[in-house]
Every structure is written in C-alpha cells, then in structure tokens.
Image: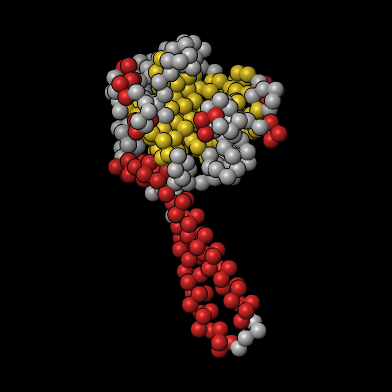
Amino acid sequence: MHKPVFITFFNIWSQYAFNHLVVFVSLLIVCSSLPSLFCLPFMAPIFSLFLSFVMLSWSIAQGQGPPSPGYSPSTSVRTLKFDQVFRNLWGPQHQRADQDSITIWLDKTSGSGFKSIQPYQSGYFGAAMKLQPGYTAGVITSFYLSNNEDHPGNHDEIDIEFLGTTPDELYTLQTNVYIKGSGDGNLIGREMKFHLWFDPTQDFHNYAALWTPSEIIFFVDDVPIRRYTRKSEATFPTRPMWVYGSIWDASTWATDNGRYKANYNYQPFVGKYTNFKISGCIAGGPASCRPPSVSPSDTGSLSQQQLEAMNWVQRNYLVYDYCQDPKRDHGQLPEC
C-alpha cells in the first residue's frame, strides 16, 4: 500500500524545511562570533529559502482535503438517539451508552457490539465515529449492515471498517460489499481501502452508506468516496439487513495481512459513536418506500460536483482496489 500523494509530498517538503532550518541555525551560531558583513551574504538567501519551504509546506497541509461535493446529504437525515435505533448485541460489560452516543471497547476478555432494533431493505445509514490513537493493530472498529444471523454461511454485508494500525502508520478505512458469502472459504470480498485526509483519532467524523435498489455509495463527512452500482442480482445485496457497530480482535488479517497482532498491553481499545443518522425502508414495510436522495437534484444519482469530489479522493487516498488486484480471480468479479 502506498501513502496518499498529498501526505507523502507534504512529508518530503517538511523534511526539506527541517534541513534548511538546521543549516540556518548552524550558520547563526558560527556567525555570532564573526563580523556581520561576512555572514550577511550567506544568511539572507538561506533564510529566505527556508521561509519559502515553510510556507509551501503549510499551504500543502491546508490543501489536503477534497474539493467540496456541493451538497451534504446528512443534513437531510434526522439525528437519532442511540436507544431509538439500537440495542446491545454482545459484550454489554464493554459498552457505555447514553441517549446520544455509545462507547465500546475491547480488552483481552471480550469486545462489544450493538445491533439495530429492526432490519432494513434500503436506506441511508450513518454515524460519527472517533478512533483510538496509538497501537491498535489487529483491532477492527466497524459500522456495517449484515444479515449474518438470518443467513449464516451465505449472508450479505455492506461494511465500513477501520483496520487497526501501528503508531507510525495511518488508519485504513475499508469499504466492502459482498453477497451470499461468509468466512467459510466462499467469501468474495469487494474491498476498496482508503487513507483519510484527516486524523480520525482527533475528533468525530461522519461515515455513512447509502443502499438503494440500484447502488451503494459510501460517504466520509458527506464526501462520496465509493460508488458500487448494481450490474446484476448476483453481484448486489437485495435481502433485508440489520445495522451493526462493533469492536473486535481480527489479528489474523486486519493489519498488514496479519503481520501485526492485537497487543493487549495497550488495552482497552476504544471506539466511540454518536450522531446516528438512520433513514431507511423497514423490511416488510410499504412497497412505496424509497431511500432518501443524496444529491441536490433529488434524483438519487450523484451530481457532477459530487462525482468530481469522489474521483479526487480515489486519485489521492485510495490504497487498494479489488478490481485492480492481479491476484484476484476476476472471473468471480464480473462487475470489474
């Protein structure tokens, strides 16, 4: 996996700026014992070059975010309290909930998870999340849809998963869609993985998925990052799913393909959720129900400005695309 273009570029320029600062300070020390007329010809251009590097580094840092998508679909969806939508699923001793939010954690005894009160046929599903900093290798913090309990062994999922990391690496946001598969060896994952243009451990950010009969769109802070369209019934989830959140130990694969495991010397590993945005068609509900639109045109399709923002994210922050992986059997991936 490669680091995002902007972050890598920023790190290079920052190193240049630091090197020039070292030269400047060294010359300043030497010149303190010499006549000023001798040092001035050398100091001025080096100081000027140092300032230009600092200003350029700062401007790069300010420009890491994506262009505006021009529309914020989350503003059209009402925020719900946790207990209006969810109940504990497992690990009740490892979660702390109030009306507006929930904190869940993993330690060597257990993780924790929650589940929606009812299943949905389609809709907009979002939450603000804040992740733990430091060593979190092997740990998955997730918000997703699934019908695993209804169809064990051949269930569907729409995943928003944060793959734990080591302190010197960035968090990876994994989006995934799979249909009638599970961890029994028949899993056909459709993963696209991203780094982010911000630190997800510093504050809450909004993550969401729109699931309609024709497409699935993933959002980060209202910026679309991935669009998965329905090419056939065989490659698109159509059965009702529940909404889940969880934190658990996935040491066998989560971080660098299992190279780094969960280290419980750093426990507890904590995930925080708030600002729940759920607007969907309940399974078995009226046939006339339609999921909310996520574009200003109210047609359901992304606008040109939203598509441009999504393309920008994929150019600069996409770190894995299953369709581009030569190790995958593309005979099983007709949508690619």
Residue in the foreground of this view, choosing between 253 and 269: 253
Q: Is residue 201 at all visible to an observer of this figure?
A: yes
Vertical order, 52 against 290 (above or below): below
Q: What is the quadrant of the C terminus in the image?
A: top left
The mark total stands at: 0
Q: Residue at x 54, y 20 (%)?
A: 116
Q: Is residue 83 at all visible to an observer of this figure?
A: no
Residue in the foreground of this view, choosing between 204 and 250: 250
Q: What is the quadrant of the N terminus in the image?
A: top left
- Residue 132, how many percent across, how many down? 62, 38
Residue in the foreground of this view, choosing between 153 and 96: 153
- Residue 292, how many percent across, how many down? 39, 29
Q: Residue at x 60, y 43 (%)?
A: 167
Vertical order, 56 against 256 (above or below): below
Q: Residue at x 47, y 50 (%)?
A: 7
- Residue 171, how many percent across, how many down? 53, 39
Q: Is residue 167 left or right of residue 334?
A: right
Q: Where on the picture, by quarter, is residue 263?
A: top right
